[in-house]
Amino acid sequence: SYSNDMQAGVIFAGVKARSVYERLSNNFESLSEAIRKAKPRPENVNVADAIARAGELLSEVPDGVVRELVIVSDLQRN
């Protein structure tokens, strides 16, 4: 179960990082659906771009609020 004030974001890494929403969201159903539908792409991953995008999203979180970054990989080899 999620707390009422919890928010999250999903960023798909690729040549260019793509976030599901432009801001953090509490729409966990939609974020979960985006993860379920995700498929590996035959492209190189720009990790720095994905982490920079995560930093942008997390920078909008007010001071005093816990921020977490979780990285999930399909471990495909390029």
Image (cartoon, rainbow, N blue to C red):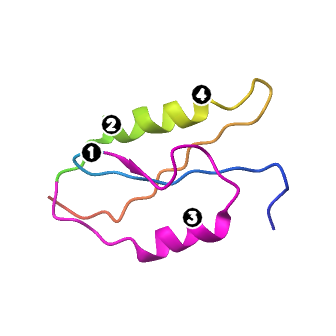
Residue for badge 2? 49
Q: CA distance from mark 4 to mark 1?
A: 20 Å
State if disc 1 and disc 4 touch (CB < 8 Å): no
Q: Amino acid at mark 1?
A: Lys
Label 3: which secondary element: helix
Q: Residues within 10 Å of mark 1 (few under 14, many from 20)?
A: some
Residue for badge 4? 59
- Residue 19, percent from left and from top: 44, 50
- Residue 22, percent from left and from top: 51, 44
Residue ID at (65%, 52%): 25
Residue for badge 1? 16
For this rendering, which residue is in front, 36 or 70? 36
Q: Which of marks 1 and 2 precedes in the sequence?
A: 1
Q: Amino acid at mark 4?
A: Ser
Give the extent of the magenta segment: 17-43
Q: Residues within 10 Å of mark 2 (few under 14, many from 20)?
A: some
Is residue 41 part of the magenta span, yes or no?
yes
Q: Quadrant of residue 41?
A: bottom left
Is residue 46 part of the magenta span, yes or no?
no
**Between marks 3 and 2 in the image, the one whose residue lies nearer the viewer:** 3
